[in-house]
Amino acid sequence: MPEAKSSSAKKTSHKEQLPKKIGGYKPTQMLGHGAMGNVWLCHDESLDRMVIVKQMVPKLLDQDSFILRFQQEATILAHLNHPAIVVPYALWKESDGQLSLSMEFVMGKNLREILDACKQPPIWVVMAILHEIFLALSVVHRAGIVHRDLKPANLMIDKDGRIRLLDFGVAHVDKRNGDDLTLTMAGTQIGTGAYMSPEQTAGDEATPASDLFGMGIIASEMLLGENVFRGESLNQTFQNIRRLKIGKKAFPPETPKGLVKLVMRLLEKKPSKRPLSAADVADELSRLMRAYPRDLTPYLAEWVTAAVKGEKSAIEPETYPNHSKKLFIIGLVTGAAVSALAATLIHIL
Ligand SMILES: Nc1ncnc2c1ncn2[C@@H]1O[C@H](COP(=O)(O)OP(=O)(O)O)[C@@H](O)[C@H]1O
Ligand SMILES: [Mg+2]
């Protein structure tokens, strides 16, 4: 039986508080409670594996829009077939009307937990994380879905160093109710407000470009060591998101120029000035990372394990030497020599 080594903020240690069964599963731990419901770690005895069960908070049950959203989250997960997106197993209604969703258990840590242990990860870690998330986001956006709630707690790195995008709870909601709900939720849960795009803070509809802005905040948080948009109040945070510009000089000197430029473009206040798509950003990142091994997941896994223990990782990916400058000079010298020879020959003949 896999050991329950998961993530998350609030965990129940008292066995007696656990319900006997949730659906057909045996709950082993409450991993947390969020705006919409509780998250349980359970054992599926029939297949001897751990599963996650997300349940709606009973008081929300009578609110149609929340039920719709919960069902929508399950449907979105069921249709997004990508290794970075968790696989749902079943959606059912308990006898008391409570909705529950079971899904794949990701053994790992969410990015909030990781950043709490290590505020400023090394540049290669930042680039590797961003690259994987943008690849996943490009699949989400191509399916016509906007996540709308990107924040470190909704991203996980599993034990193999793979990124997972979680929590499609507020994704792609009917526009009629959507904006109001986003703001109501932000009001009750300040963390969400701190990663919103300027257009979302103004109550406008979120587009894929809004997800890019949210990722810009996450990227700047990893590079600067804090979310500089977070204010004392939700209002202050919204003001910062609408007005605050991070200058080039705020980034640590070792940050590659290309990465600084990219993050600044993600953080453009006007959606039309941001990169065209998540796929474009992933491409740009892979260009910036060409000196590194193509698959950084084993390094990332190793780094996360050390980081959450507060240790420094012994492993760092080796970079391949950059021959392009050398080749350019050789080319230039050869070209000049050949031209000189040709000129001499013409002169002699
Ligand atoms: N499939 C999963 N595997 C492991 N941990 C998970 C999984 N889904 C959620 N969690 C943990 O529970 C937390 C809350 O889950 P989330 O889906 O974001 O719900 P909420 O709507 O409550 O924010 C996450 O930050 C993560 O740490
Ligand atoms: Mg969440």
Image (tube, helix red, strand yellow):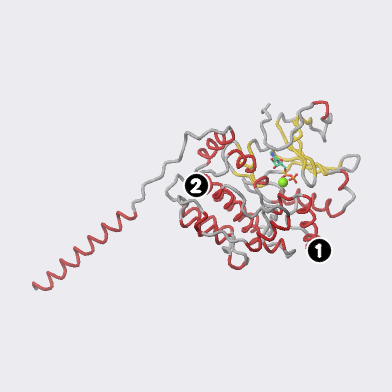
Residue most toward the front?
A: 232
Ligand 1 is found in which quarter of the picture?
A: top right
Percent across and percent down for residue 274 are 58, 64
In three-dimensional space, the C-alpha distance between marks 2 and 1, rounded to whole angstroms, equals: 41 Å
Of badges 2 and 1, the one in the foreground is: 2
Residue most toward the left?
A: 348
Contact between marks 2 and 1 (CB within 8 A): the answer is: no
Q: Which mark is residue 52?
A: none
Q: Nearer the viewer, residue 12 or 156?
A: 12
Query: Residue at position x 71%, y 49% from top?
Result: 191
Q: Quadrant of the N terminus?
A: top right
Label 2, on which residue? 123
- SS under mark 2: helix
Report how many numbered discs are placed on residues in the image.
2
For the residue marked with disc 2, what is the amino acid?
A: Ile
Q: Nearer the viewer, residue 221 or 292?
A: 221
Check mark 2 vs ligand 1: CB closer than 8 Å? yes or no. no
- Left or right, 215 with respect to 337, comes to right
Q: Is residue 314 above or below residue 183?
A: above
Percent across and percent down for residue 270 are 62, 67
For the residue marked with disc 1, what is the amino acid?
A: Arg
- Left or right, 348 with respect to 245, comes to left
Q: Which mark is residue 176?
A: 1
